[in-house]
Amino acid sequence: MANIMNRFFFLVLIIASELVFVSPGVESASTNVNIEEVTKIGAIVDANSQMGKQAITAMKIAVQNFNSDSRNHKLSLQIRDHNRDPFQAAMAAQELINNEKVKVIAGMETWEETAVVAEIASRVQVPILSFAAPAVTPLSMSRRWPYLIRMASNDSEQMKCIADLAQKYKWRRVAAIYEDNVYGGDSGKLALLSEALQNVSSSEIESRLVLPPISSISDPKEAVRGELKKVQDKQSRVFIVLQASLDMTINLFTEANRMGLVGKDSVWIVTNTVANALDSLNTTVISSMEGTLGIKSYYSDDSSPYKEFSALFRRNFTSEYPEEDHFHPSIHALRAHDSIKIITEAIGRLNYNISSPEMLLRQMLSSDFSGLSGKIRFKDGELLNADTLRIVNVVGKKYKELDFWLPNFGFSKTSSKHNVGDISSNIAAEGFTGPVIWPGNLINRNPKGWAMPSNQEPMRIGVPTKTFFEKFVVIKDDPLNGNSNDKNLRYDGFSIELFRLVVDHLNYDLPYEFVPHDGVYDDLIRGVYNKTYDAAVGDLTILGNRTEYVEFTQPYAESGFSMIVPAKQEESTWMFTKPFTWEMWMVTAASFIYTMFIVWFLEHQSNPEFRGTLKDQISNTFWFAFSTLFFSHRANIQSNLTRVVVVLWLFVVFILTSSYTASLSSLLTVRRLEPNVTDIQSLKSCNLKVGCVDDSFVKKYLEEVLGFRSGNIVSFGNIEANYIQKFENNTIDSLFLERPYEKVFLDKYCKKYTAINTYRFGGLGFAFQRGSPIALDISRAILDLSEDGRLKTLEEEWFKPSSECSADERYSTRPENLTLHSFWGLYIVYGATSIFCFLLFVIRLLNNSWSHQETYQGNIAAWNISARLARYIHNRKGTINNPARVSALDLAPPALELSSSRWEYKLSPTHPPENLQVELQMHE
């Protein structure tokens, strides 16, 4: 039956093709004997649609203008109706080429029609002017269809505009709707939209609704209703109509309104395939689209050529089509008019010699003028300048224009790229010019593009019943209601109170109800993912693998885990030695002895208090040095060099005693706990048992990251009493707790346990379904509460330490021992200065000794000087009265005699040094 119908239809077309007709009102060659030559131009449009009717009227006006201005050359417009069928468009092209011998064909509102006509025309070298363009321009298009000229741009810029809208309003999930073409595809628009969303706004297409071609179905409403049911269970409420015929668009919005999909917090966006035809929709249809955003191709309507054309167009259109409501020219009418102008200017440049199709094509491609639809200039068969887009908003029974979107610039309040830099306002931040009317008469805020909860259908929020510590989540029966069902439970705890505080901070109502979840935390996360719950509230740790299923809010508490170990308070008999390290004690003692020697050496010959027997000298010097530690020395210092050394030593003593006193006070007053285990490596090397909660990610982390053997990991239920019991019966040697729980645990048991080795993670947060805009609002509210201090106040209210564990004790740090490194510079300065004084004294001593040697014994051997220096060190009689000139030779007679308390030298000046005899006389 189908073959018979096709053959019959083909026969009708063949018969119709033999009937050459000329459109009414257009002159032909046979009607005017003065016309020397007539060029036939073919037009293939949808003659029954308003878009096609406008195109026909505009082309007739352009032909009439040319014919009235040209004396020797006329145009004849041959119009064919493709009836929205690419096959009929192909048949019409063959008939125009073969029978009418047209030189150029214009029209084709869809790319499917353009593709088949271009295939036929390219074979016979007939230029094609198409009003449509593919969504994506193939690289081989100019080679495949060299005679095709496209009057429209591809859809890439339009998809970028939609992505910018999604980014501006933070819509994370969208649903794409398109009417399937006759070849079973979306013309590439879906791929362009997906790429643009990911590149610009990190959004994604959640649903794809494919509507069948309206010509192939008997009940369009039922088909539309079946597709829309697929998104009723989805949360996303951002609908983007990529392509659809006007009839399908009417059915789509009618059914969407009936199903409640065009309401508060929903968003509808239509591309130029629908928005450019808004003018042709009747008031009943357009009112069903109230709140819709449309993207139209922009054209200037304030120029003189446009005003002249518009006046003539309205007069002709209303005269020829009185049944049509709208009579203002659309972008399709302007492009149709410009297409005729492209042809006439090319013919004029050829001096009306159009025998060569190639020359005619070349002249058409070289067009460069400002047409009614915009700048006309081609490159590779396509308009060189991308369309400037205009954002419109359907309001009531009409639409209003908002702002512009410029390629490579984005949103703008002006259509000129040259003035974009001068715009002071930022549309992305301030919004469009004038208020935007959204579906459902939403006021005071922008739509979330999400199925928002209502009082009839509140948000279902899962709450864990098995929490690690009740301070985070507490679920109890409501004493005011004797029933024990889920709706009569009372929810409390830090996490619950924080969520309530956050919801109150939002600028819109968020109805919700808590639902207890009796299971592990990972199952709660999966419940949000599979839409069992709309969200989850509690002490939920933000982990990388969990973010693949849900979307977390901003962390409201620090997370990670710490190693809890038993500890005892540090007590020691030798506590007074703790302020200094042993190296510090050794260097201090050495400095003390060194100071004793320096003072004794510089003072014992000139100062009676440092003379006497060796025992007296040592005791007196020690007592002097020791008394300097307490600044109670009484000895009279005579040498200026000694005074320099003592002053520096007193400064060293002052610094050391002050530091020692402060450190010892801290050690005796600040409570300290010494852990039994200091690090994880000791746990593993000693094969000790470690504990963790079984409903936690910690166990997996201990095995896979820290390298604990599974046999050494003891997991148990998340009950607080289990922790203490495992420690007391020595089942475990350490416990790994998440950071917030560690804080609660130590606030209660700070006397017996301490925490070491903290590992940090993402924090605690609330979980929502991926793409939910509510998660972003909750995150912003958490930040606001944190900045104004209310979050800190809530923490202090719920996590008060016990009376035994004050905040100062709980978080006091152990004072460190004072090391030699802290005082190294002080010792260097003191040592260098004292050595300098010592060397200066010795040099002066040797200098005086050498002078006397030259006077009395010029030939005495040099080693005698050392002997005299040794005698000086051991001399106790004080034969030298002037310490400034220290020499035993000062008072010696020609026959020199040096004596000491232990031994005595007798030197004769008559004996040479080499025969010098030394007689040692011991004294009691």
Image: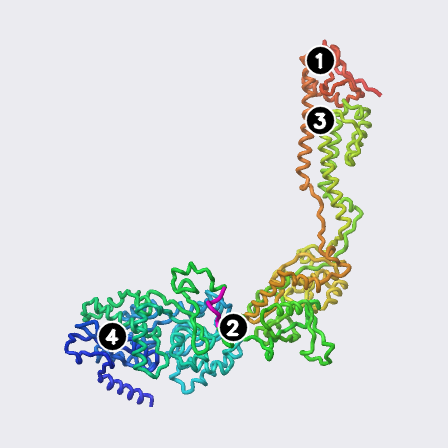
Secondary structure of the residue carrying numbered label 1:
helix
Callout 1–callout 4 Cβ contact below 8 Å: no
Closer to the eye: label 3 or 2: 2
Q: Which residues are magenta?
A: 430-436
Disc number placed over residue 63 in the picture, else none: 4
From mark 1 to mark 3, how far is it between C-alphas? 39 Å
Q: Is residue 745 magenta?
A: no
- Name the quadrant of the C terminus: top right
**Where residue 346 sits: x, y (%)?**
23, 68
Q: Which residue is mark 2?
A: 449
User: Tag 1 or tag 2, which sits nearer the N-term?
Assistant: 2
Residue type beneath disc 3: Leu
In the rendered structure, the answer to whether residue 359 lies left or right of residue 204 reads left
Q: Which residue is mark 3?
A: 641
From mark 1 to mark 4, how far is it between C-alphas? 145 Å
User: Tag 3 or tag 4, which sits nearer the N-term?
Assistant: 4
